[in-house]
Amino acid sequence: MKLRVAVVYGGRSGEHEVSVRSAKAVMGGMDKSKYEIAEYFIGKEGKWNPRPILPEPGAQPEIDVVFPVLHGTFGEDGTIQGLFEMADLPYVGAGVLGSSVSMDKEMMKRVCLERGLPVVEYVTVTRENQDISEALRRLPFPMFVKPANLGSSVGISKANDEEQLSKAVAFAAQYDTKILIERGIIGRELECSVLGNETPDASLPCEIFPSRDFYDYEDKYLLDKAETQIPAALPPETTDHLRRLAVECYKAVACEGMGRVDFLLESATGKLYINEINTIPGFTSISMYPKMWEHSGVPFPALIDRLIALALDRHRRKSATQFTR
């Protein structure tokens, strides 16, 4: 009997279009002899088509497992995961806690720092108080400014002076109430895919070669000029260290199922910094999460199978938990 997989995609975030492209790739990669696909599209205004998965156990008995392909706000931040938990539905990817901690770049950094993991120095400001004086005092130029709770490089700017910094903060504040200002790292951009629940594995890493000043939204999804290399040309000891850091970051933020950890390798010092973790990485034709696993010996259909199996396994384990007396 085929498993009925509900693919939920679209959503209200600034990454709506990326989500649609990722979902189409996921559905195209599913083995139709194993899975029956039920599409749940969420429009930019939040309307579901067809009706929403209701937050009541047994509300959608025809669904065996949910595959959320919702990037960014309301999809990757624990909110939709809470709905699936309330509905007692198995779902692919991180749970509520792992999703919310990973989505908030400042919280992710705090957790990594507590575990002794390397992150770039930063200052936080808010939409209501865009005071950049602390950043000017503590951080050298260039600086990168980003919304704390978005992905796909939406709302990110590079600032080379005080005027640019003020404008970058105001721009990022359009997308979030909390804004991160980070020391700019001059070096290489690297990524590593992670897969698993309690005992996750890391793929071979890749390197991104942006066609612009940095790997922004246009470079990722519109220009088609950025280049990548898998595996990244790194000394074996650096590759091993990066993969260990990827797993440690994944475990620190309580990620499950899948995640892509992004790194910066500083040219001047040779030091690796964890930049961020994405709990629902892209699955588009240019997305590196599935490509890294393919180069690591896990082809796309097998990756889909593994992610669904991990979701079902986690649900089985959680079902053994007693929630009432």
Image (cartoon, rainbow, N blue to C red):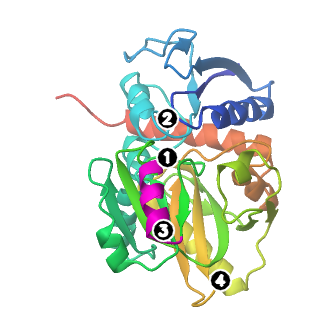
Q: Given contact means CB atoms under 8 Å apart, are the residues at marks 2 and 3 in contact?
A: no
Looking at the rendered structure, the secondary structure element under dot 2 is loop
Q: Could you tell me residue 229's position as x and y percent?
A: 81, 67
Looking at the rendered structure, the secondary structure element under dot 1 is loop
N-terminal-most mark, 1 or 4:
1
Local crowd at mark 2 within 10 Å, few (<14), some, or many (≥20)?
many
> Which numbered disc, 1 or 4, marks the residue closer to the eye?
1
Local crowd at mark 4 within 10 Å, few (<14), some, or many (≥20)?
some
In terms of depth relative to the viewer, which is nearer, 88 or 84? 84
Amino acid at circle 2: Gly
| The N terminus lies in quadrant | top right
Q: Which mark is residue 238?
A: 4
Local crowd at mark 3 within 10 Å, few (<14), some, or many (≥20)?
some
Q: Is residue 5 magenta?
A: no
Residue under the image location 51 percent in, 61 percent down = 276
In terms of depth relative to the viewer, which is nearer, 193 or 19? 19
Amino acid at circle 1: Leu
Range shown magenta: 160-171
Q: Which mark is residue 248?
A: 3
N-terminal-most mark, 4 or 2:
2
Horizontal side of residue 142 vs 57, given as left or right: right
> Would you place residue 28 above or below residue 222 in this image?
above
> Which numbered disc, 2 or 3, marks the residue closer to the eye?
2
